[in-house]
Image (spheres, grey):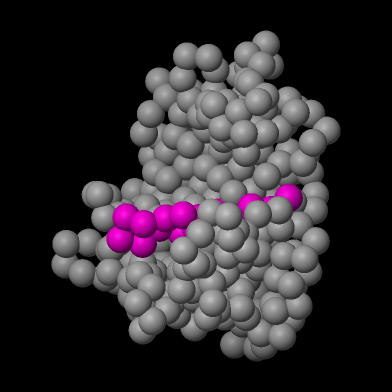
Amino acid sequence: MSTAQFLVALFLTCLMATSKANLYDDVQITWGDQRGKILEGGQLLTLSLDKYSGSGFQSKNEYLFGRIDMQIKLVPGNSAGTVTTFYLSSQGANHDEIDFEFLGNVSGDPYIVHTNVFSQGKGNREQQFYLWFDPTKTFHTYSIVWNRQRIIFLVDNIPIRVFNNMESSGVPFPSNQPMRLYSSLWNADDWATRGGLVKTDWTHAPFTASYRNFKANACVWSQSGSSCGSKSSNGLQDSAWQEQGLDSKGRNRIRWVQQKYMIYNYCTDFKRFTQGLPTECKRSRFL
C-alpha cells in the first residue's frame, strides 16, 4: 500500500469511528416527560424547562477515571433563575461528584460557571467564573479530566480549575467510586441568580439548552471491574488523560482565567472558614 493509500484508509477509518458516535448509544433521557429529546438521528440532544418541570439525562455507562467532553449551547436570552448542569456523580450519602453548573442570567449579563468537587459526601469546594464569550450563541466544549493525580475542568480545552489528589495529606479525593455523567435543566430561582433576588420570568419559557458530540475516553465500570486500557465508549483509544496535568502553556492559561474571570474561590473565603482554610488550600497552587 502506498503512503497516499494508507492516509486515505486511515482517514476513512477515523471517519467511520466518528460517525458511530451517537447519543442514543451513550445517554438516556431520565426525567422531564418529553421535555428532553434526542434529535437528528442521535446527533443532538435538547433539554427544556417550563413552569411545570425541567428535564435531564444520564450516561448509560459508569466510569472510574476518564476524560468526558460535551459540547453545550446554553439557554439564550433572559435565563435568570435557571441552572444547567453537567456533572459526574456516584450514588449514596458518601458520594463523589465533579460539577459544572451554569447559572442563568438577565439578558446582557454574563453566565456564571459554578464548579465544585465532592469526595466521600463532602463538598464546599466552590469556585465560580465568568466566561470570556457568550455561551448561548454557539456550542462550546466543556470537559472533565479525572485521573488518579488530579481533576481538571476545561472550557474549549482551556483549563479553568485543577483539584489535585492530596490524599497523602488527609484530603479525600474521588478515587474508588464509579461515577455516571448527568445533566439537567431546572429552576433554582431561590438562589441561582444574584442569590435569588432575580426570579425566573416564565413568559420566556420554555427554556432550552442543547448538547452534542459527547465523548468519553474513560474506564467503563461494570460488575466485573474496570475496562481501563480497553476501548473508550466512543470506540477510540486515547490514554493521554491518564497522566494529564498542566504544562507551561496550561499553567499560563489557567493563570489568565483565574486572574481575569474568577469571581469566587473558597480558598480565599476567610469569613466562611473562620477556623482556617481547608488543608488543600494551603498546599496546592491551582485548585
Work out whether 257 lies above or below 203: below
Work out whether 32 lies above or below 226: above
Give the percent coordinates (x, y) of residue 150.
48, 75
Residue found at the very far top of the displayed protein? 203
Determine if residue 40 is in view: no
Work out whether 92 lies above or below 238: above
Give the percent coordinates (x, y) of residue 250.
69, 77
Nearer-the-camera pick, 129 or 276:
276
Which quadrant is the N terminus positioned in? bottom right
Nearer-the-camera pick, 229 or 51:
51
How many discs mark residues in the rendered view?
0
Give the percent coordinates (x, y) of residue 179.
34, 57
Left or right for 1, reference 175: right
Determine if residue 97 is in view: yes
> Magenta part of the protein: which range?
115-130
- Residue 134 location, quadrant: top right
Q: What residue lies at 65% left-to-right and 54% top-to-bottom?
A: 264
Which quadrant is the C terminus positioned in? bottom right
Q: What residue lies at 38% left-to-right and 81% top-to-bottom?
A: 169
Q: What residue lies at 26% left-to-right and 55% top-to-bottom?
A: 94
Give the percent coordinates (x, y) of residue 40.
57, 35
